[in-house]
Amino acid sequence: MAAPNDLPEVELDTKNLYREDVFTDRRAGSIRRLTPVTADGSPDAARAVLFSGQTQLLTPAGILPLGFEIEARTLEEALKKFPEGVKVALEQAIDEARELRREAASRIVVPEVGGGLGPGAGPAAGGGKIKFP
């Protein structure tokens, strides 16, 4: 067990605090609003309010969670931009899946020559598995 003084010290950045509010229709998704606040909890007008959206889509492979930032100044504006944010996040997820598939398909598997079985072993010495009648 680690000694208490070996543990990292975790502190919140008092100059970067936000109050979090979540709005949902309990069907399509949710919008998070992060309102900047000072250390005493009062609104910090010097920083912008941040919005992000979250939803889940059912795919043949299972549930796909999507999260995305929404450029908006008000909740009403964020609500209007939510559908477009979903589309963009879904397109990015599809592009990432295609790229992963492309990378997996482009891996070249090269068998070891001789297979470490010593001299004379391997396909040249009749060690291959393909048999011709």
Image: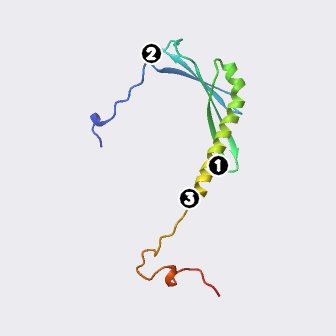
Q: Residue at x 46, y 74 (%)?
A: 115
Q: Residue 59 appears at what percent x and percent y?
A: 70, 47
Query: Marks 3/2: CA distance?
Result: 52 Å
Q: Nearer the viewer, residue 8 or 110?
A: 110
Depicted 73 relative to depicted 11: above or below: above
Q: Position of residue 2 (x, y in %)?
A: 29, 41
Residue 68 appearing in the image:
yes
Q: Which residue is mark 1?
A: 98
Q: Up-down: is 38 above or below 91?
A: above
What element does badge 2 sit on? loop
Q: Which residue is mark 3?
A: 107
Task: Kindly identify which residue carries mark 2.
Answer: 39
Whether residue 25 is visible here, answered yes or no, is no
Sooner in the amino-acid sequence: mark 3 or mark 2: 2
Classify mark 1: helix, strand or loop: helix
| Number of marks present in the image shown | 3
Q: Nearer the viewer, residue 46 or 118?
A: 118
In which image quadrant can residue 9 be found? top left
Q: Amino acid at mark 2?
A: Ala
Going 51% across and 81% down the picture, which residue do you hit?
124
